[in-house]
Image: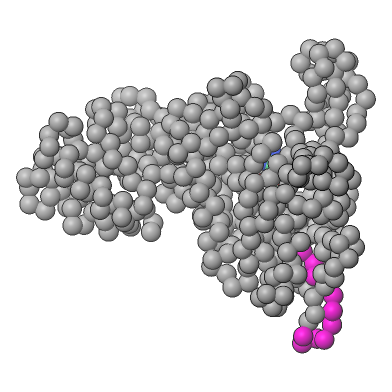
């Protein structure tokens, strides 16, 4: 895609996200706060669906995974051990003229300011952790950081899981939660933000078995992107060349996605060896080894880490579902969301607002469907066409209309309309739940 088209697609998604209550600019009435976004009702529903599908696949449906929800603030020594205090930085350059700051590795010309053409200064390292103080004293001993990743909250609880659940290797810990990075230049909507959410797994293995586990998670990551309806052809594996690997990693694959602004990292999968557990043992003085009862040997397990960004997933889902077409001679915008992630599964309308017989029947049906499908909307405002368009824009797979036939005819047929094709079908009321269940893939 050309730059102009890319921007136009992104603009359309941003404007739809705002118009339909998915995502708003953070602190908007105060002029915003760069790198922050607020999720509205449909956005939080979409995000929760994604997180629940992830939790179901990686935690609930497995016997070898332990869920966690660790604190965001951690003892500063945890970040010394992890290497974040010493090395979690990006290269920063500042323009001598306009004083704007840029991430040097994102610039094509490292000498010239991309905004004003001024001269860029020397590159220096900028630590991306948000620093804060815990308690009333503001001194070195009270320093803490908003976590830049959820991973460390799991490593520091490794021994707690061993001592309380006595798991045998291989096993994993999984967590969903907020992470914070003071990105030099947040950009591309919710792709690169300063506050975001991650879904991470630390999977502990005998070092002899790391390769099989790594392959297993490659296929699990693809299975998850299928679960949430991302097109297979838009998800790519990018093997990081040995020379470019982080110092703790022996193998990393970046899973990239074809976003409107180009192919960019969606998820990461890394073989982190025993780097983390050894580092925490060294700094905390607490032994984080594992005793293999069968082989009677003690060793430090190795780690495979699949790391998923929630917000990058939301952007991938929204941008791959965004469609503009023509239906019944009118232009329309819709989201071809998989029913698994759609914020609203079914909408119920009475044909007319001012006919009590229709509205009461529709409300009754709405209550029944809400019990069955959870997220169902009732709408009686405006013409039927307008109501369809509203649901199309939030990606509701099916709309059900109660009309005069529903209250007068045998079998009480309702009209079910398909979002993608606009096709309408008459379904008898007694068959409606099973019809929708089947269509929604439940
Ligand atoms: P990038 O190179 O794009 O900065 P990264 O390699 O630093 O990303 P990781 O440290 O591997 O990212 O973080 C794991 C995942 O967390 C990423 O794959 C991404 O989905 C998500 N993530 C990281 N940084 C951000 C951010 N600033 N905004 C939104 N999501 C992020």
Residue lying at 79% horizontally and 49% vertically, measured from the top left:
240
Residue lying at 15% horizontally and 48% vertically, measured from the top left:
413
Instruction: Name the residue at the right extreme.
Output: 122
Residue lying at 21% horizontally and 57% vertically, measured from the top left:
431
State whether residue 244 appears in this view. no
State whether residue 18 appears in this view. yes
Query: In what quadrant of the picture does the N terminus appear?
Result: top right
Of residue 268 and residue 131, the one placed in the foreground of this image is 131
Range drawn in magenta: 293-304
Residue 298 among those drawn in magenta = yes
* Ligand 1 position by quadrant: top right
Q: How is the image coloured?
A: one colour
**Number of dots carrying numbers:** 0
Residue lying at 20% horizontally and 43% vertically, measured from the top left:
362
Of residue 138 and residue 97, the one placed in the foreground of this image is 138
On the image, the x and y values in percent for residue 127 come to: 83, 38
Of residue 266 and residue 237, the one placed in the foreground of this image is 266
Q: Is residue 71 above or below residue 406?
A: below
Q: Is residue 253 above or below residue 31?
A: below
On the image, the x and y values in percent for residue 289 come to: 82, 73
Instruction: Name the residue at the front extreme.
Output: 136
On the image, the x and y values in percent for residue 402 come to: 18, 42
From the viewer's perspective, is 91 left or right of 293? right
On the image, the x and y values in percent for residue 72 come to: 69, 49
Q: Quadrant of residue 325?
A: top left
From the viewer's perspective, is 405 left or right of 135? left
Residue 15 among those drawn in magenta = no
Q: Is residue 126 above or below residue 221?
A: above
């Amino acid at each position: 895609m050309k730059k102009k088209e890319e921007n136009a697609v992104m603009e359309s998604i941003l404007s739809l996200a705002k118009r339909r209550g998915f995502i708003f600019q953070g602190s908007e009435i105060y002029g915003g706060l760069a790198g922050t976004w607020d999720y509205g009702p449909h956005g939080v529903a979409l995000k929760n669906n994604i997180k629940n599908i992830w939790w179901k696949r990686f935690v609930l449906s497995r016997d070898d995974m332990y869920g966690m929800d660790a604190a965001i603030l951690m003892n500063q020594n945890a970040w010394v051990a992890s290497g974040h205090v010493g090395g979690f930085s990006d290269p920063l350059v500042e323009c001598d003229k306009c004083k704007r700051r840029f991430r040097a590795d994102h610039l094509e010309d490292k000498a010239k300011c991309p905004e004003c053409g001024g001269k860029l200064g020397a590159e220096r390292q900028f630590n991306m952790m948000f620093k804060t103080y815990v308690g009333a004293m503001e001194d070195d001993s009270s320093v803490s950081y908003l976590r830049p990743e959820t991973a460390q909250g799991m490593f520091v609880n490794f021994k707690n899981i061993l001592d309380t659940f006595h798991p045998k290797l291989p096993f994993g810990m999984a967590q969903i939660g907020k992470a914070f990075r003071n990105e030099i230049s947040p950009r591309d909507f919710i792709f690169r933000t300063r506050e975001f959410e991650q879904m991470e797994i630390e999977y502990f293995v005998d070092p002899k078995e790391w390769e099989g586990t790594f392959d297993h998670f490659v296929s699990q990551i693809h299975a998850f992107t299928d679960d949430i309806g991302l097109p297979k052809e838009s998800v790519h594996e990018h093997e990081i060349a040995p020379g470019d690997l982080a110092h703790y990693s022996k193998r990393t694959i970046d899973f990239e996605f074809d976003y409107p602004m180009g192919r960019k990292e969606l998820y990461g999968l890394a073989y982190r060896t025993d780097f983390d557990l050894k580092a925490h043992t060294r700094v905390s003085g607490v032994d984080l080894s594992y005793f293999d009862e069968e082989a009677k040997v003690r060793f430090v397990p190795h780690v495979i880490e699949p790391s998923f960004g929630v917000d990058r997933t939301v952007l991938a889902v929204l941008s791959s579902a965004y469609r503009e077409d023509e239906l019944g001679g009118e232009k329309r915008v819709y989201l071809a969301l998989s029913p698994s992630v759609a914020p609203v599964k079914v909408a119920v309308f009475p044909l007319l607002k001012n006919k009590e017989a229709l509205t009461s029947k529709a409300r009754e049906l709405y209550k029944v469907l809400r019990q069955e499908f959870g997220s169902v909307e009732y709408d009686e405002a405006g013409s039927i066409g307008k109501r369809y368009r509203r649901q199309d824009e939030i990606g509701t797979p099916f709309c059900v209309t109660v009309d005069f036939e529903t209250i007068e005819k045998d079998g009480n047929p309702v009209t079910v309309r398909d979002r993608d094709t606009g096709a309408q079908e008459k379904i008898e009321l007694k068959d409606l739940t099973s019809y929708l269940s089947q269509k929604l893939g439940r």
